[in-house]
Amino acid sequence: MGDLNTFPVSFKVRDQRIVIVGGGDEALNKARLVTKTTASVVIISSQIEADFSGLAVTLEQRAFVPADLDGAALCFVADHGPDGEAAKLAARARRVPLNVVDVPDECDFFTPSIIDRAPLTVAVSSEGASPVLARLVRARIEAALSPDLGRVARLAGTLRDRVAKLLTKPQARRFYEDLVTAPSPDVEALLSVHAADAGAGVVWLIGAGPGSADLLTLRAQRLLQEADVIVHDQLVPDGVIEMGRRDAERISVGKKSGHHSFTQAQINTLIVRLAREGKRVARLKGGDPMVFGRAGEEIAALRKAGIAYHIVPGITSALAAAADAAMPATLRKVSPGVVFATAHGASDEELSHWATLAGSGLTLALYMGKEIAAYASGKLIAHGLSPQTPVGIVVNAGRSDRSFLLGSLGQLSVQTQSLPEGPAIIFVGNAVAHGDFQDAVPLAAAHYKVA
């Protein structure tokens, strides 16, 4: 996601004036937009050509004078002649926010495409770069939102003081969620239910995938919007964390290979405590929580504490790596299966077992083995696996900065150069030869950085 050049806000204009300088179709289009507000709208132009009838505006057919902007909330300039130039200078001098129609570089603000469910509004803006795209996005959102949402929003507004007195913040948040999603909400019944709710918390163990935000599941995205707290590992990208509710608390537990700011025991204690406080906790883990995600230890702690939990699968790194390399991890008559294993801390007995499995045709997908790749490869060869066995490595699988390396087990066993930065999946087996590694760097030249 790129950085915003504008910050979206809602500007108060009640009982204030909005001045539009210009009398043509451009001015008319702006007038149709701003007359949806409670502001007083004034049209000033030496020549009024468009038909403003039917709009609640004040028409003044005359030359613009700087005093026209005294006390104005906003100014739109839809005139490219002397009046427009004078209005721009006056707006700058009086620090009145200015919008020059169709000239983005001269605008202090932009008018978004608006979905009107007053008092609820949804604004879509492209910072003036592509108004047509903004209108198309607006049309899709418009079709998805019930026309009745405005009534529900007004009802929620009238209940704020009462809800604040009756319910805790977590209870109130759930009450409003039920209020706006129920077809015909019974306010009194909902208040009674949520007031009686002891606020039992829940923990969602969510797989964040390999790193690309658009590989997150729809279920994970929905739960992130419902979570009160997001507890995330260091490898989870900011784009995924930002999918959470804006006011959700975010806690980084800093788990990364070789660096642990939180121990696993501390993480277990943290998520149990948060749930006992009645909070809904999104425990975000890179990849899939059930594949080298140490979810088992957290599940055991939650069970012991009697905390409700749910597991949301994610795309594990090996599957993302196989997809990046178009490499079938299983392939008829080549590889009848695939083994997910972590090379970090593997015993000699385990390496012997893997060598036997790979020798029978299975594909090995080794996690967390980059630092000991040469050692593990040498051991696999010592246990009978051929040095000619193909090896493919994907670094930063599922991300835009992924890179590929290709060679043999024998080459990897004598590799002395560092591999590219980032988590790596090492594939070992004949299935590698059926992948698309044409842009890969040979293992013998692995010290070269791959874009």
Image (cartoon, rainbow, N blue to C red):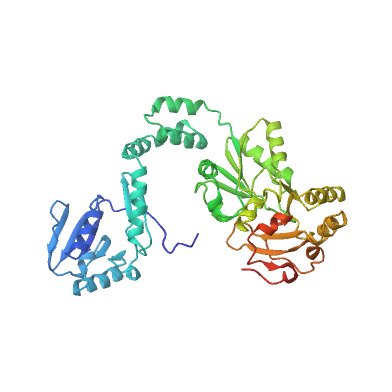
Rendered-image quadrant of the C terminus: bottom right
Question: Along the horizontal axis of the image, is 180 left or right of 389?
Answer: left
Whole-percent x and y of residue 126?
Answer: 38, 60
- In the depicted view, which residue is nearer to us: 196 or 378? 378
In the rendered image, the residue lying farthest to the front is 333
Question: Along the horizontal axis of the image, is 55 left or right of 210?
Answer: left
Whole-percent x and y of residue 172?
Answer: 47, 35
Q: Is residue 96 visible?
A: no
- In the depicted view, which residue is nearer to us: 296 or 68? 296
Q: Is residue 189 visible?
A: yes
Position of 198 relative to 105 (above/below): above
Question: Along the horizontal axis of the image, is 315 left or right of 42?
Answer: right
Residue 31: which quarter of the image? bottom left
Position of 78 relative to 278 (above/below): below
Identity of the residue drawn at 44% across and 28% down:
191
Q: How many marks?
A: 0
Identity of the residue drawn at 57% across and 44% down:
229
- In the depicted view, which residue is nearer to us: 61 or 435? 435
- In the depicted view, which residue is nearer to us: 413 or 195? 413
Whole-percent x and y of residue 292?
Answer: 71, 47
